[in-house]
Image (cartoon, helix red, strand yellow):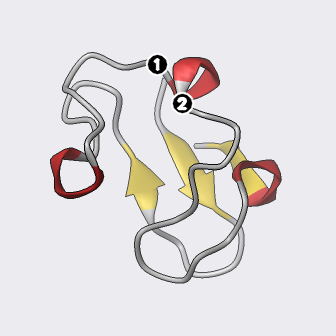
Amino acid sequence: MAMVCDICGYTYDPEAGDPDNGIEAGTAFEDLPDDWTCPLCGAAKADFVDE
């Protein structure tokens, strides 16, 4: 399930991951490290909502 940053609108797509920040494709949002932040604005995981 994709999650959207409530601050800037960035969409985390688990199928794509976040390769620029070491997150492999196929990584579910809930499996991201607790200290992972939005790659666009730096918001915390808690600032993401269901798409």
In the rendered view, does 10 fall on the left or right side of 27?
right
Q: Residue 47: give x, y in percent of width and height.
A: 78, 60
Q: Residue 3: give x, y in percent of width and height.
A: 55, 42
CB within 8 Å, label 1 to label 2: yes
Q: Residue furthest right?
A: 46
| Vertical comparison of 46 with 27: above or below | below
Identify which residue is drawn at 72% across, 47% down: 49
Classify 10 Å Cα crowding around label 1: few (below 14), some (14-19), many (20 and above): some
Identify which residue is drawn at 82% across, 50% down: 46
Q: In the rendered image, which residue does mark 2 sit on?
A: 32
Amino acid bearing label 2:
Leu
Q: Nearer the viewer, residue 29 or 37?
A: 37
In the rendered view, does 21 fall on the left or right side of 8?
left
Rendering quarter of residue 27 = top left
Distance Cα–Cα, label 1 vs label 2: 7 Å
Q: Please tell me the numbered disc located at residue 28.
A: 1
Amino acid bearing label 1:
Ala
In the rendered view, does 30 fall on the left or right side of 1?
right
Q: Quadrant of the C terminus?
A: top right
Q: SS class of the residue under badge 2?
A: loop
Q: Residue 32: give x, y in percent of width and height.
A: 54, 30
Q: Nearer the viewer, residue 10 or 43?
A: 43
Q: SS class of the residue under badge 1?
A: loop
Identify which residue is drawn at 42% across, 79% down: 40
